[in-house]
Image (cartoon, rainbow, N blue to C red):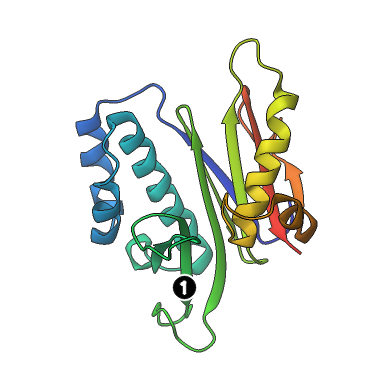
């Protein structure tokens, strides 16, 4: 792992009831998060998305030295620019005042991925970052998923998303496997940092 980069995993297993998740995490979600999460209709995907947002807020808050609800988290689609989907972005935050957009703010690279019951976030003070994870299903060769997670992690780091040029994104990034550690067993994961 490079200095200035943190990766954190969380799991829904054992799977608590949705009402327990909502009550437990409500205090860590900003109103803008709740608006975005309303679009996720499937209960499992909703719970996993909420877990990922809470994890992202907690890790970003730790890196910035602010309260999790003070993290200026927003979402932006690289294709259409829509604010209700796409990649997460954290604006610079002044470490002293905690106010976003202040001169001397700290840019923070962030990325989120989830698969199965797992959510992973990457937070970087070393520049733009991308993370991806896929669950290895019984009988599936993990090597078959490796190039996919590398491509997706690199595309996230460059900010292009899946519509981008994977070969160009890989050339612009330093990509590394997260498996076998610190990734949990049974998954293939990659972390990409823009050079």
Q: Nearer the viewer, residue 135 or 125?
A: 135
Residue at the (47%, 36%) spot, across then down: 10
Residue 182 seen in render: no
Q: Find the residue positioned furthest to the bottom.
A: 103
Which quadrant is the C terminus positioned in? bottom right
Residue 14 seen in render: yes
Please state the horizontal and vertical placement of residue 165, each as a whole percent of the image.
68, 54
Whether residue 84 sits left or right of residue 193 in the image: it is left
- Against 69, is 152 above or below? above
Please state the horizontal and vertical placement of residue 140, each as a whole percent of the image.
66, 16
Please state the horizontal and vertical placement of residue 121, each as a whole percent of the image.
53, 48
Residue at the (75%, 45%) spot, across then down: 176
Whether residue 82 sits left or right of residue 153 in the image: it is left
- Against 167, is 158 above or below? below
Whether residue 162 sits left or right of residue 74 in the image: it is right
- Against 93, is 174 above or below? above
Tag 1 residue: 91
Residue at the (38%, 42%) spot, across then down: 49
For the image shown, how many numbered marks are present on the structure? Answer: 1
Q: Nearer the viewer, residue 57 or 130?
A: 130
- Against 135, is 158 above or below? below
Residue at the (38%, 54%) spot, across then down: 85
Please state the horizontal and vertical placement of residue 60, each as a whole percent of the image.
48, 60
């Amino acid at each position: 792992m490079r200095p200035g980069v943190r990766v954190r995993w969380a799991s829904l297993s054992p799977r608590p009831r949705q009402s327990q998740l909502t009550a437990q995490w409500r205090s860590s979600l900003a109103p803008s998060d709740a608006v975005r999460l309303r679009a996720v209709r499937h209960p499992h995907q909703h719970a996993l998305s909420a877990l990922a947002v809470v994890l992202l807020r907690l890790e970003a808050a730790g890196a910035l030295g602010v309260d999790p609800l003070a993290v200026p988290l927003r979402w932006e689609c690289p294709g259409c620019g829509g604010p209700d989907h796409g990649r997460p972005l954290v604006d610079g935050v002044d470490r002293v005042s905690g106010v976003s957009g202040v001169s001397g703010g700290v840019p923070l690279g962030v990325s989120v991925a989830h698969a199965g019951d797992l959510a992973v976030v990457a937070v970087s003070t070393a520049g733009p970052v991308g993370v991806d994870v896929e669950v290895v299903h019984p009988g599936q060769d993990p090597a078959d998923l490796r190039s996919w997670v590398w491509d997706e992690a690199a595309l996230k780091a460059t900010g292009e998303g899946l519509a981008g040029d994977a070969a160009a994104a890989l050339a612009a990034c330093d990509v590394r496997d997260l498996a076998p550690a610190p990734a949990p067993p049974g998954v293939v994961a990659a972390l990409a940092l823009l050079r």
